[in-house]
Amino acid sequence: MAGKDAFGTQFLRDTTGSGTFAVVGNVTDITGPSRAREAIEVTAHDSPNKYREFIKGLKDGGEIGLTINYDPANSTHAALDADFEEDDLRDYQLVILPGDADEHTWDFSGLITALGDAYPTEDKMERTVTVKISGMPVLTATG
């Protein structure tokens, strides 16, 4: 098989600080984690063939991007507002292929860095959410 259908992927937030997670409702699109690594330049006057040289630098866990069919009365959407306002990091999960034998879960701590709401005249209300990952996100086979 060439690929997998991502339908059903879930974004969850820790509701208690002790590992009790709840699914955020009405998520339509998810991106990330978009991990990155710095390249530290170490080029010197005697670098071979006048090519720049690099060594590995610090890693960045990246971000998770969400698009939600926004409902201000939805408690999980209101919880994202509270997460944005809090000063502490929160634990989140991204569950890929939930209930499938190939289920995998990303576990990470993060902070919400952006919330964007849209209220178009001829379409649904929508919210975009950006979660900045702090530390290393861990992918585990959970199926």
Image (cartoon, rainbow, N blue to C red):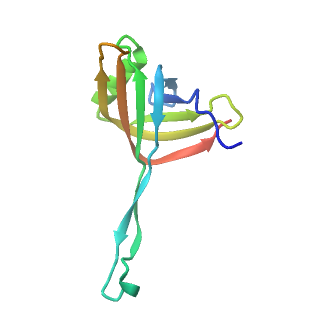
Residue 10 seen in the current view: yes
Instruction: Determine whether 63 is above or below 16 in the image.
Output: below
> Can you say which quadrant of the picture contains the N terminus?
top right
Q: Is residue 121 left or right of residue 17?
A: left
Total of numbered circles in the picture? Answer: 0
Image-quadrant location for residue 40: bottom left
Residue 15 in the image: state x and y as whole percent. Answer: 45, 25
Residue furthest toward the top?
Answer: 73
Q: Residue at x 41, y 71 (%)?
A: 55
Q: Nearer the viewer, residue 126 or 9?
A: 126
Residue 123 in the image: state x and y as whole percent. Answer: 36, 15
Residue furthest toward the front?
Answer: 122
Residue 24 seen in the current view: no
Instruction: Determine whether 73 is above or below 130 in the image.
Output: above
> Can you say which quadrant of the picture contains the C terminus?
top right
Residue 20 in the image: state x and y as whole percent. Answer: 52, 26
